[in-house]
Amino acid sequence: MATKVAMFVFNNLDHDARVHRQAQTLAQAGYHVRIFAFFSPPCRQHESYPGGYEAVRLDHRSSLDRYWSEWFPRRSKPRPAAPGQPLQLPPNRVPCRPCPPPPARQLPLHSSAQRRGHRAFVRQVNSQWWQAATAWKPDLCQAHDLDALWAAQATALSCGAALIYDCHEIWTEQHFLNDREEVTFWNQWEARLAPSVDGWLTVNRSLAQIFAQRYGVEVQPLLNCPRRQELQPAQQGSLKQQFEGRPVALFSGGFQASRGLEELVAAALLQKEVAVALQGFGPHEAGLRQLAQQHRSPVTFLPKVPHAQLTEICSQADIGVMPVLPDCLNSYYCSPNKIFDYMMAGLPVVAADLPEMAALLEHCNNGLLYDSFSPNDLAQALIQVARHPQREEMARASRRWAESRYNWETEGLKLLDLCAQLLERRQRGQLKAKNWVEPQSPPR
């Protein structure tokens, strides 16, 4: 019988490439992988994926919630979404590189009723996952982030399974956790569950060092790299046909807060040599379009594409742009998926001068850095790469490093090795002791 792996993730799996890659890798290695995820219409509650793994999305809604979210919309006219807060063009500043760490956040003491309700909902969902997963009797449990760790830990305790904790984020250093009560809650929650973890994963070396120092454990960096993909030479640079032959700088990703996209819109205004294109989707799309239209910024918006086509789309550009605003410690130490996608597409990269991205570009010699908060510095970096005599060599370096080192075929071996080690320790009875942690009353 195949070894069973239960993964837990507090989203609906629509856009979580990291979870899908890991599940597919384990399934192809002969594991029976079941992902316990969050249900939201129109997702299916049970879904099998071509890679040989499955998802179980438990419906956590009350009957009244189901009525309002399913029956009522079908019988009412759709209402336009409420307009968000208008976006503003950011001011320029004298470039400061490397970008300094963000200052300590000054947070209010107490959570709103909504945030307390959300924490209670997270515990409820984890309890339901635990009951469903325990009945399946997995041999190995993996939590993707802190809001799924209790379910994985409780299931591992109930079934005598090994426990992996994959920390995608420094959880309490994210900007949307914006009160002291919330931060204390999650810090204490992680500290109580951490002693049960048999194997630790995270997204880069900086986060690995932070968790290693915090808990005295060994943490394996598992980078968010794409799989190797062939490029079609005829497609490379074809976006330039829309821009009268000018070099094209592409951002591909989510249109969200703190991504530095307003700075990119402003940078497009400050120079005419490089065309700027934004490809993706997200809650700030309408605001970004309005901002670009209001200031006549020559930014082109490209539609969202399936993830399987991302490398093909990126390869049509000339420069990959990786803007991030380090407004919290989690963003400061980030290493976004897209920078590795740009490299696989064979693009030189212009990236915010933050620790992980700076180390990557210095190692690969494949791009330039800029000050996250300076649109003028970003504009100058785009021009410098476009004019750089070694631009084509930067592009080749990106592709060369992506093919040889920064790809999922290489990174996925780390996951397989960790699972094999933990299962061997399980057979020998050498897993960490696991104690029941009451989900309803973590310390305050």
Image (tube, rainbow, N blue to C red):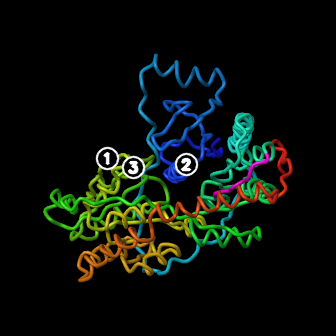
Nearer the N terminus, badge 2 or badge 3? 2
Discs 2, 1 touching: Cβ within 8 Å = no
Is 231 positioned to the left or the right of 207 in the image? left
Is 225 positioned to the left or the right of 155 in the image? left
Label 2 sits on a secondary structure element that is: helix
- The label nearer to you, 1 versus 3, is 3
- Residue drawn where x is 37% and y is 46% of the image: 306
Residue that mark 2 sits on: 23
Residue 161 is covered by the magenta coloring: yes
Residue 413 vs 137, above or below: the answer is below
Residue that mark 1 sits on: 303
Q: Inspect the image, locate mark 2, and give the three-letter code of the amino acid beneath it.
A: Ala
The image position of residue 442, as x and y in percent, is: 83, 49
10 Å crowding of disc 1: few (<14), some (14-19), many (20+): few
Residue 109 in sight = no
The image position of residue 260, as x and y in percent, is: 44, 63
Is 219 positioned to the left or the right of 235 in the image? right
In three-dimensional space, the C-alpha distance between marks 1 and 3, rounded to whole angstroms, equals 12 Å
Which circle marks residue 307 in the picture?
3
10 Å crowding of disc 2: few (<14), some (14-19), many (20+): many
Magenta part of the chain: 160-166
